[in-house]
Image (tube, helix red, strand yellow):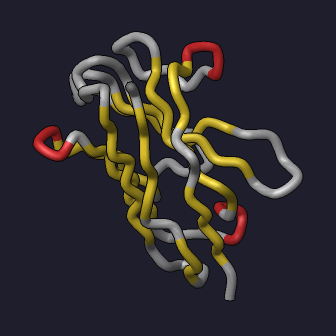
Amino acid sequence: QLQLVESGGGLVQPGGSLRLSCAASGFTLDDGAIGWFRQAPGKEREGVSCISSSGGSTNYADSVKGRFTLSRYNAKNTVYLQMNSLKPEDTGVYYCAAMYGSSCRLRFSIVRSWGQGTQVTVSS
């Protein structure tokens, strides 16, 4: 059974950093792309970043380019989202998702399974 478990969220001041983890079971990172999405209070869920099944391709939303970095550690079957220079507008629940297909595409229509989410709050 495919399961994704996020961790690493918390409260951080503007300009600070957090590293989110997405640990997969019942699914290996070579099986498909992994995406990160977030949902701010009162807003729709949006795509943040994704990494292809080979790990050779990543993609980022314009709002996080240059600040967020996605990586993976195959031995732990885990994907990491390093978030630097955090802003209050980065606040929200962050979800990782296993995607159908190998390519990095942030589309809801190809989400295979969601994690439970982890809260990120950026506030002074």
Query: Horizontal and vertical percent for residue 86?
Result: 55, 69
Q: Does the image show residue 29?
A: yes
Query: Outermost residue, right direction?
Result: 42
Figure check: 16 above or below 91: below
Q: Residue at x 54, y 51 (%)?
A: 64
Q: Does the image show residue 59?
A: no
Q: How many marks?
A: 0
Residue 31, quarter of picture: top left
Query: Horizontal and vertical percent for residue 34?
Result: 40, 31
Query: Outermost residue, left direction?
Result: 75
Query: Outermost residue, bottom direction?
Result: 124
84 or 81, nearer to the observer = 81
Decide if residue 22 is on the left or right side of residue 88.
left
Q: Which quadrant, please, contains the N terminus? A: top left
Figure check: 100 above or below 74: above
Figure check: 40 above or below 121: above
Query: Horizontal and vertical percent for residue 76?
Result: 17, 46
Q: Which quadrant, please, contains the C terminus? A: bottom right
Q: Residue at x 82, y 57 (%)?
A: 41
Query: Outermost residue, top direction?
Result: 101
64 or 79, nearer to the observer = 79
Decide if residue 64 is on the left or right side of residue 98.
right
Q: Residue at x 57, y 47 (%)?
A: 116
119 or 48, nearer to the observer = 119
